[in-house]
Image (tube, helix red, strand yellow):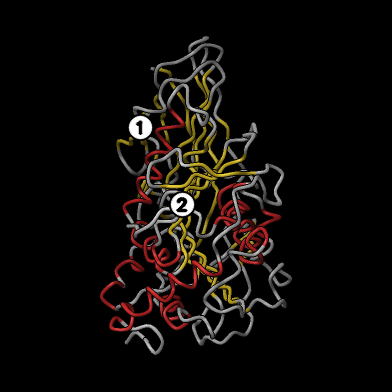
């Protein structure tokens, strides 16, 4: 039985307007200004209708992963958590919030999907400031309170690499199917026992699929979080660390979450962990916390090294590099980077050979024929044309072990 001592289905209608007032009072930012503590000062604009886009003012040479966001109270004001979102963007991310700048009304989960679709389209559109500047294989979804429910609703999108839930939890047991279909790493950042969403989040935590990599952090700040503080406060700091780890492969950032002496261990954060590994080393049992939820620890998995494939001969060729990005007991996530040779190509085809026992469950930024053994992957309509030396990235999730796969590329 889902515990609903604070938020129940009947109470939700009364709570949401109250939360909208809290958001308006505590998290409405000052006038737009370039900012953030990261190396790429960021700002926002309304370039996507009914959304607010946060990005570095000067886009770095490294491609930007994508983070799509649902606001507290499902507010259609894309500036509701502006300090927090601009902070994330300043560390080299494209962030898209539901709702236009200072907009009014309510949002829907479909708007998160629209954000993803738009970002991928802009990455492939010549003339766009984001043309070929995004890493469309690295996409995260997140949301605060009602926005967290929006994030849950789209978390099974195969293009999404990780989900982040801030001060939120499912309201009804009938929605638990959204937990059962989770396959990508998830992180919860909750405001402690005084957070109105705390019992819902803890209930969700106990129902996550076995083997799913997951993190739960509780900071005793209540439901309002720290979004309106300078650079999003402590919630902004840990969100950046999670996204740098999960979307950029930054293991130093991952050290905040994994290990006996993790960066959030023995701090004001109360943490729990399930199936998290860093360089193949399993996370220990969680630190004591208010929740009785168990935290299983799987057998450690090896940390494979990237396996580059040689480029075919000829100036019209391409090369492909395969990397296992995450491995846990029952599955893995891998990426493949396709790079054109010394001349432009109009399309590419990959011959991917998976190790025995491995199978693809979902693939993004490509079209696969077959799921195990010898698999053929071809480009999507938006990422086949590559200039000389230009790259495109695709990824997939699979069952079994990802290490040992090989891939070769042929230009078409």
Q: Determine whether the residue tagged by mark 1 lies in a helix, strand or loop.
A: strand
User: In 3D space, how far apart are the residues under numbered discs 1 and 2 (Cα atoms)?
Assistant: 36 Å
Q: Residue furthest bottom?
A: 5
Using a 10 Å C-alpha cutoff, classify the residue at mark 2 as few (fewer than 14 neighbours), some (14 to 19) or many (20 or more).
Answer: many
Mark 2 sits on what residue? 97
Q: Residue at x 51, y 81 (%)?
A: 195
Relative to 96, residue 309 above or below? above
Relative to 60, residue 27 above or below? below
Rendered location of residue 367, percent (x, y): 33, 35
Q: Is residue 46 left or right of residue 61?
A: left
Between disc 1 and disc 2, whose residue precedes?
A: 2
Rendered location of residue 297, percent (x, y): 55, 72
Front residue of 53 and 328: 53
Rendered location of residue 62, percent (x, y): 63, 35
Rendered location of residue 360, percent (x, y): 37, 47
Q: Which picture quadrant has residue 57?
A: top right
Mark 1 sits on what residue? 376
Q: Which picture quadrant has residue 370?
A: top left
Quadrant where the N terminus is found in the figure: bottom left
Q: Are marks 1 and 2 in contact (CB under 8 Å)?
A: no
């Amino acid at each position: 039985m889902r515990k609903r001592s604070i938020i129940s289905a009947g109470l939700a209608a009364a709570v949401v307007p109250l939360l909208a007032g809290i958001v308006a009072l505590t998290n409405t930012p000052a006038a737009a200004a370039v900012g953030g503590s990261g190396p790429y000062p960021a700002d926002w604009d309304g370039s996507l209708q009914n959304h607010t886009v946060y990005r570095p003012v000067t886009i770095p040479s490294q491609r930007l992963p994508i983070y799509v966001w649902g606001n507290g109270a499902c507010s259609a004001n894309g500036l509701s958590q502006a300090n927090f979102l601009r902070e994330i963007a300043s560390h080299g991310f494209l962030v898209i919030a539901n709702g236009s700048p200072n907009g009014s009304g309510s949002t829907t989960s479909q708007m998160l999907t629209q954000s993803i679709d738009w970002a991928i389209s802009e990455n492939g559109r010549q003339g766009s400031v984001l043309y070929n500047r995004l890493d469309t294989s690295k996409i995260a979804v997140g949301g605060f309170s009602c926005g967290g429910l929006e994030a849950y609703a789209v978390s099974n999108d195969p293009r999404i690499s990780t989900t982040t839930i801030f001060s939120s939890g499912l309201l009804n047991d009938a929605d638990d199917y959204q937990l059962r279909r989770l396959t990508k790493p998830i992180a919860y950042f909750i405001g402690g026992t005084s957070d109105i969403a705390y019992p819902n989040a803890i209930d969700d935590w106990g129902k996550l699929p076995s083997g799913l990599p997951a993190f739960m952090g509780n900071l005793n700040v209540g439901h309002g979080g720290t979004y309106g503080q300078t650079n999003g406060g402590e919630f902004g700091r840990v969100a950046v660390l999670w996204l740098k780890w999960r979307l950029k492969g930054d293991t130093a950032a991952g050290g905040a979450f994994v290990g006996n002496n993790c960066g959030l261990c023995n701090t004001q954060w109360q943490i729990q962990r399930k199936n998290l590994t860093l360089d193949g080393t399993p996370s220990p049992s969680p630190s004591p916390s208010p929740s009785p939820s168990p935290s299983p620890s799987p057998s450690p998995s090896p940390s494979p090294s990237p396996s580059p494939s040689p480029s075919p001969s000829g100036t019209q060729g391409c090369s492909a590099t395969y990397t296992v990005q995450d491995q846990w007991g029952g599955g893995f996530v891998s990426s493949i980077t396709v790079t054109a040779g010394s001349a432009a190509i109009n399309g590419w085809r990959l011959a991917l050979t998976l190790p025995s026992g491995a199978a693809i469950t979902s693939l993004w930024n490509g079209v696969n024929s077959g799921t195990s053994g010898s698999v053929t992957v071809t480009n999507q309509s938006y990422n086949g044309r590559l200039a000389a030396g230009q790259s495109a990235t695709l990824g997939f999730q699979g069952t079994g072990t990802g290490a040992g796969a090989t891939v070769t590329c042929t230009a078409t």
